[in-house]
Each structure stands twice: as C-alpha cells, then as structure tokens.
C-alpha cells in the first residue's frame, strides 16, 4: 500500500495579498515553524518518504528542504525534485494586491474574475481551468508512478493546486475544491490500494 501526503507550504511573505505563481517569496519564521510541526507529525506516524516533490516556487522548495532535513532525508535534486505543474495560480496583474485594492483599482476585471474564476483569468494570469489542467497532467503521471513504485510520497505545493489534486484523487468535480481546507503547513494523508485513494487524515498545523 502506498501513502501519499499532501502538504501546503508554510506561511510566506506577502500575507493578506494574492501571492501566486508570479510571487517567488520566502517563508516567514512562522512558516518555518509550521513545516517543523508538519515533519513532527510524519515522524510520529513513522512516515519517511524517499522523495519529496515540490512546486518550483521558493516557498515550497524551502518547505521541502526543511522537511527533508527534519526527517533525515538527503537534500538532493533526486530526492527533492521540483515540478512546475504544482505551482500556484498565476494571478497576473493582481499579484501582490489585496482584495480591496483589486476592486478599487481594477473594478471591471476584478469583478469578472471574482464572479467566475474558473473561466476568467486576471489580466496576464491564469483561469482556474488552466491551473486544473496543469494539476490534472501531474495526476496522470502520479497514477503511473504509484502503479510502478510501492513507496510513500510527499508533495509540497499550494492551496490552489493541492485542492484540485484532492478533487482528482477523490474523483469529485473540480468545482468542489472550495470544500477542502488546507491551512499553510497543513497536510492531507491518503492511502492508495489498487489505485483506489482513501483520505485517512487531515492535519492543520497553524498556531
């Protein structure tokens, strides 16, 4: 049986604004503490993966490195490979802005996006369906990997990409992704037997 652990990166700089694919920011001290707690949970459950796959963004890569060090896993390109398909949504023109600033400075484009983020994208950014296609492509490769290798695997990515991945794992429509809450540093555990994923735990590690 395989175990798959999804972990959202720790708190990063830019809190309170839209921090997406275009904002390559580091973790805060609190974010590093959250990843430390996430590692402690894995050690308690005797989960020690050989591979930790992260997105390509700094906050996820840094989270992966910290987790690997906590679990005693060598930090190498082979053990901690990045995958751009797990990157957060590209918020385009809205990167680094608050909700209020978007509606104040870009009311027409902001309202279009907020009313239907699946079909509409921020100027220069991605629509929800574009992010879903990226994650869907990753999920196909993930299924192939699990059919070949019997190993525990950890993924460290972002709220948007991980919620869509949970939908794919549970075979539920992507519009249901808002029903899954995964705080920064939080993790969702799955067991996969005969290509049938079962969610076994949800841990939130925010203080």
Image (cartoon, rainbow, N blue to C red):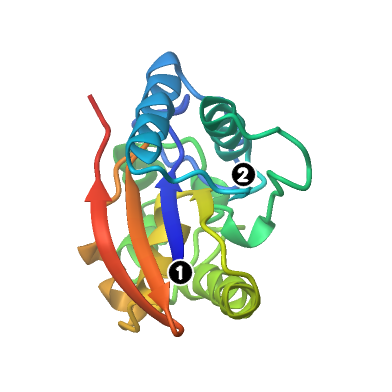
Nearer-the-camera pick, 107 or 91: 91
Q: Quadrant of residue 26?
A: top right
In the picture, the quarter occupied by the C terminus is top left
- For the question of whether residue 176 can be seen, the reply is yes
- Residue 129 appears at what percent x and percent y? 48, 76
Write the residue at 41% across / 25% down: 36
Note whether residue 118 is visible. no
Q: Tag 1, which secondary structure? A: helix
Quadrant in which the N terminus is drawn:
bottom left
- Is residue 83 rendered to the left or right of residue 154? right
Rounded to the nearest angstrom, the CA distance separating label 1 from label 2 is: 15 Å
Question: Could you say which quadrant of the image residue 183 lies in?
Answer: top left
In front: 191, or 92?
Answer: 191
Query: Measured from the top left, where is residue 94 in percent x and y?
Result: 49, 46
Does dot 2 land on a helix, a strand or a loop?
loop
Task: Give the total number of marks visible in the rendering.
Answer: 2
Check residue 128 in the rendering and tell me which mark sits there, or answer none. 1
Whether 59 is drawn above or below 158: the answer is: above
x 61%, y 44%: residue? 22
Q: Which mark is residue 9?
A: none
Residue 22 - label: 2
Label whose residue precedes the other's in the sequence (1 or 2)? 2
Closer-to-camera residue (70/80): 70
Q: Measured from the top left, where is residue 139 in percent x and y?
A: 55, 74
């Amino acid at each position: 049986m395989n175990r798959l652990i999804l972990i959202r990166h720790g708190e990063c700089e830019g809190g309170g604004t839209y921090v997406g694919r275009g904002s390559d920011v580091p973790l805060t001290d609190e974010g590093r503490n959250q990843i430390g707690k996430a590692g402690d949970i894995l050690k308690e459950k005797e989960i020690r993966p050989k591979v930790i796959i992260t997105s390509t963004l700094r906050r996820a890569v840094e989270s992966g490195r910290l987790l690997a060090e906590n679990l005693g896993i060598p930090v190498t390109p082979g053990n901690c490979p990045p995958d751009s398909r797990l990157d957060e949504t590209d918020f385009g023109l809205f990167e680094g802005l608050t909700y209020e600033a978007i509606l104040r400075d870009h009311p027409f484009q902001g309202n279009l996006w907020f009313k239907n983020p699946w079909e509409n994208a921020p100027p220069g950014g991605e629509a929800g369906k574009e992010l879903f296609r990226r994650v869907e492509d990753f999920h196909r490769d993930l299924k192939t990997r699990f059919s070949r290798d019997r190993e525990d695997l950890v993924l460290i990515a972002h709220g948007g990409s991980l919620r869509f991945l949970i939908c794919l794992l549970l075979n539920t429509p992507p519009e249901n992704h808002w029903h899954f809450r995964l705080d920064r540093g939080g993790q969702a555990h799955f067991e996969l037997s005969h290509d049938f994923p079962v969610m076994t735990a949800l841990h939130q590690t925010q203080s």
